[in-house]
Image (tube, rainbow, N blue to C red):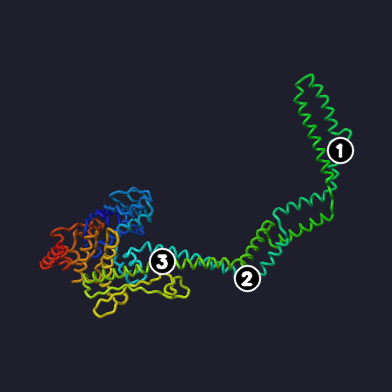
Amino acid sequence: MLNTLYVRDFALIDELSVSFDPGLTIITGETGAGKSILMGALNLVLGERASADFVRSGAAKAVIEATFSETSYEAVTLLLDEAEIESGHELILRREIAASGQSRCFINDTPCPLSLLKQVGRELVDLHGQHDHQLLLHAETHAGMLDSFGRLQVEKAGYRCLLLRCRELQRSLDTLTQRAADLRDKRDFIEYQFRELESAGLETGEEAALEEEINLLENAETLFSLSGELGETLYDADRSAYTSLSSALHLLEKLAAIDRRFETTLDELRGALASVEEAHRFARRYTSGIEFSRERLDELRERQMLLQRLSKKHGKSIAELIGLRDQLGEELSLEENVEADAALLRAEIETARKEISAAALDLSRKRQISSRLLEKEISEELKKLSIPHGAFRVDASMEEAPDGEITHDGRVYRAFENGFDRIEFMISTNIGEVPKPLVKVASGGEISRVMLAMKSALAQATQLPILVFDEIDSGISGKAAQAVGFSLKQLSRLHQIIAITHLPQIAAMADRHLSVAKRVEGERTVTGVMPLEGSGRVEEVARLISGHTISPTSLQLAGELIEAGSSI
C-alpha cells in the first residue's frame, strides 16, 4: 500500500506530504490546479524519465519520496536481495532531480540505479495515465495483455528463447552458405594463390636460417684460415699457449709444494690449461668440417631470392605468407566440407523448429483457455459499466508463410516474437452486431470502460497491490459514470485504488477524498492538497455537479451520492 507521497520543489509544488488510505482514494480539483503534477511526481518516483524543467524555479533540486507498507512481495524481495538492499515491512523510494538535470535514486536510503527503481515501481504500482487507454487501439499490445491475464510469461519467455536459438542457427547457415558461394566465385584465384604458396614450401624462421648459411659459405675460406691459425696459436706452434701454460704450471707446482698459498692459483691455471686444450679441439674439428660448395651457395641464394619475390609480391612477411597459405587452405577445404556442415545445421534447425512449434502451440492453447476466461470477465464487467449488450471477443489468427518457422497440422506459419498467434480484441456494443476490432467500433467513452474492465480483470489475475487511474472517466457521464465509480469501488476491495476524476458520481464513491488547489503565497503560485471530510466533501462533489455556483439542490444531490457510495 502507498502510505505517503512527499514532494518538495517540484513544478508548482513548494512542499507537501499526502497521506493515502486503503480502499478508494479520489483526487479532484479545478483544471490546471495541479492534479497531473501530483501524478507526474508519482510517476517520477516510480522510475520515469526526469528533466530539469521539473525543478521549481529558484530551487536547487526537487525531491519526491514515496513510502509503501506491506511490500513483502516475492518479486520486490528478489530485486532488493539481488541489489543487496535491506528490505522490511516498509519500503521508501526517493528521487532527487537537480536543477542541472542530474537525477539520483534511492531505495530505503541506499543509492540505486534508475533501472532498479523502475523495476521495483512496476511491481508495486500500475499507473494508468490519461492516454493509456489508447493502447487498446493498437492490436500489437493485446497479446501482452492477454498473457498477463493468463499468467503466461514463463511460457512466452521459453518460446522466445527457442526462437532466438533457431534464428541464430539460421544465421549461421546463411553465413556458411554465403561464404561457400563467395568462395566458388573466386575459387580459381584462391587456388592459384594457395598452389603458389604451398609449392614454395615456406617454413617459419627460414629467412634467418638462409641468411646465416649463406654468410658461412661466402666466408668459408676466411673461416678455414682463421680457425687453422687459432689451432696453431693455441696448441700446435712451438711457442703455443698450451706450451707456455704447461711451463708455468710446472713452476706453480714447485711453488705450491713449498707454500700452500699458491694452491689456489695452481687450480686456476690447471683450469685455464684445460680450457685452452678444449678450445684447440673445437678449432680443429671446426676446420676439418668446413666445406665450400658453389652449387649449395647458388641454391641458397636462389631460395632467398624466391622468398624475397613472394614477400614483395604479396606485401607480407614470410610468417604472414605462411598464415595466408593456411587460411587459403582452410577456405578451399570449406567448400568441400560446407555441405556436411550445412547438413548438420539444417538438422539442428529442423529440431529447433519442432521445439518452437511445440512451444508456440502450447502457448496458443493456453491463450485460448485464457481468452475464453477473459472474454467472460470483460463482457460481465462491461455490463456493470453500462454497456449491457457488450460482447467482448479475443480473435487469434495465424499467418501462413512458406519460409515460416512453425509447423502445425501440415501447414507452415510465420513465427512472431510472442508466438504464432496474432491477438486482437474485438467488441460489439449493441444487440445483433458482430464483434469487430476495437479501433473500428468503440467510442472514447467505451474505450475507457473497456480499459477499466481490462484493468479489473488483470488486477484479479496479478499481484499488483496499487492501481492508479488518471482520468479513467474520459468520455463518459451519467449512468456510465456511476457504473465506473461502482466498479472502482468494488476493485478497491482487492487493491488500493487512487483515481483522479471530474465526475461527481465517481468522486462520491471515495473512501478518502483529496482536493488539489492552487493558491498564491507572496508572489509565487503553489499547489496544495487538502483531505476533505463531512461538509467539505459534500461541497466538493456539489461543485463537480453544478460548477462554481453551488445550489441547495446540488448539495442535496451530492449528499445523496456520497451516502449511496458509502453503502456499497
Q: Is residue 194 left or right of residue 518?
A: right
Residue 60 seen anywhere in this rendered image of the structure: no
Quick one: label 3, few (<14), some, or many (20+) residues within 10 Å?
Answer: many
Secondary structure at badge 3 equals helix
Label 2, label 1: how far apart the Cα atoms are: 69 Å
Relative image position of residue 554 (x, y in whole percent): 13, 67
Q: Are marks 2 and 3 in contact (CB under 8 Å)?
A: no
Q: Is residue 473 left or right of residue 299?
A: left
Residue drawn at point x = 23 percent, y = 70 percent? 380
Q: Earlier in the sequence, mark 2 or mark 3?
A: 2
Quadrant of the frame with the C terminus = bottom left
Task: Give the residue drawn at x 26%, y 73%.
Answer: 446
| Amino acid beneath label 2 | Arg
- Residue that badge 3 annotates: 359
Of labels 3 and 1, the one closer to you: 3
N-term-proximal mark, 2 vs 1: 2
Q: Is residue 421 visible to us here?
A: yes
Which element is circle 1 on? helix
Return the residue nearer the eye: 307 or 474. 307
User: For the residue carrying disc 1, how many other residues have a C-alpha within 10 Å: few (<14), some (14-19), or many (20+)?
Assistant: some
> Label 1 amino acid?
Glu
Image spot of residue 39 (x, y percent) = 28, 60
Residue 167 on image: x %, y %: 48, 66
Q: Which residue is tagged 1? A: 232
Pointer 2 residue: 184
Q: In the rendered image, which quarter is residue 179 located in? A: bottom right
Name the residue at 46% across, 64% down.
164
Q: Cβ–Cβ below 8 Å for labels 3 and 1?
A: no
Secondary structure at badge 2 equals: helix
